[in-house]
């Protein structure tokens, strides 16, 4: 008798798990997609006020208005100039450190990596305030150089940890075989090490760009009132422009991140991002 009841219980539990997962998936879909749908509707809506369940009409006027405002155009220009520079500067500084952390077991290596990670695990507003006092002394307040430095501080974690894991995953026997065949150190690095580590480096660059493009606290603190990027311009938009303009600008702010994640998704899903946060 017990043998007949057991399959029924298992079948009931299986359906219960499926129902719970379905409910959870629907809730997550609402939480993630809901705000995006809200933004999309408002971006094209002529007007949409409660309690009406639909907008009074659709228009592209709000997109034209965003590109007509000089301050918003300057903010977009600044974001698309500063963010790539931050990625390049971060790569120049961090990739050698990532390679050294992956290939050389020097004293304090693990402590260095853990301290770097822990420094990014806490709110940075205190650090930004301290940097601001130093910037006043160095005359870097309200300058592009000052904003780049602040944003680079936040990209170090991505540009060091993820490439370090990528370099560490390259089999050393391949490099040794190439050296035995007569290849120079630089050629081995260029054709084997760098090529095999490139997916991890690509993920690191994508994550660094997204961070720099979305960074607001430090950029606002040291850049205003001379330098405004798209995230810092959002403060003024929310307070002074119609909600439709805010929706349009939010969509424009989201597009680069979504496109980059889409281009690098196979490496992110393939584990390059997760492997980058493992200490070996």
Image (spheres, helix red, strand yellow):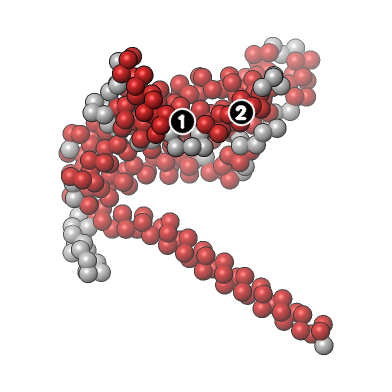
- Residue 36 place in picture, x, y as percent: 36, 55
Q: Quadrant of residue 96?
A: top right
Badge 1 is on which residue?
154
Q: Nearer the viewer, residue 160 or 81?
A: 160
Q: Quadrant of residue 276?
A: top right
Residue at 32%, 38% in the rendered image: 231
- The answer for how far apart the CA atoms under marks 2 and 1 are is 15 Å
- Residue 192 place in picture, x, y as percent: 67, 23
Residue at 36%, 31% in the rendered image: 218
Query: Where is the C terminus found, in terms of image quarters?
Result: top right
What is the crowding at mark 1: few (fewer than 14 residues within 10 Å), some, or many (at least 20)? many
Q: Left or right? Give the position of 210 relative to 73.
A: right
Query: Where is the N terminus found, in terms of image quarters?
Result: bottom right
Q: Quadrant of residue 211?
A: top left
Dot label at residue 113 = 2
Q: Give the structural element (helix, strand or loop) at label 2.
A: helix
What is the crowding at mark 2: few (fewer than 14 residues within 10 Å), some, or many (at least 20)? some
């Amino acid at each position: 008798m017990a043998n007949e009841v057991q399959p029924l219980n298992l079948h009931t539990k299986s359906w219960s798990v499926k129902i719970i997962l379905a409910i959870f998936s629907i809730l997550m879909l609402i939480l993630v997609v809901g705000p995006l749908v809200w933004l999309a509707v408002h971006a094209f809506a002529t007007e949409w006020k409660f309690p009406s369940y639909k907008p009074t009409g659709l228009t592209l006027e709000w997109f034209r208005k965003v590109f007509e405002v000089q301050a918003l155009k300057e903010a977009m220009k600044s974001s698309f100039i500063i963010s790539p520079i931050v990625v390049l500067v971060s790569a120049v500084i961090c990739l050698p450190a990532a390679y050294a952390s992956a290939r050389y077991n020097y004293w304090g290596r693990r402590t260095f990596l853990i301290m770097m990670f822990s420094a990014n695990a806490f709110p940075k507003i205190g650090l930004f305030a301290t940097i601001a006092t130093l910037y006043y002394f160095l005359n870097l307040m309200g300058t592009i150089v000052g904003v780049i430095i602040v944003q680079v501080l936040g990209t170090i974690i991505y540009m060091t940890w993820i490439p370090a894991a990528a370099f560490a995953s390259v089999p050393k026997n391949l490099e040794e075989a190439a050296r035995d065949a007569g290849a120079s150190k630089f050629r081995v690095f260029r054709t084997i090490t760098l090529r095999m580590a490139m997916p991890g480096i690509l993920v690191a660059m994508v994550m660094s760009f997204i961070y720099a493009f979305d960074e607001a606290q430090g950029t606002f603190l040291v850049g205003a009132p001379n330098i405004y990027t798209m995230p810092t311009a959002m403060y003024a938009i929310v307070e002074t422009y119609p909600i439709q303009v805010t929706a349009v600008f939010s969509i424009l702010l989201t597009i680069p991140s979504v496109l980059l994640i889409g281009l690098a998704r196979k490496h992110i899903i393939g584990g390059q991002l997760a492997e980058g946060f493992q200490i070996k």
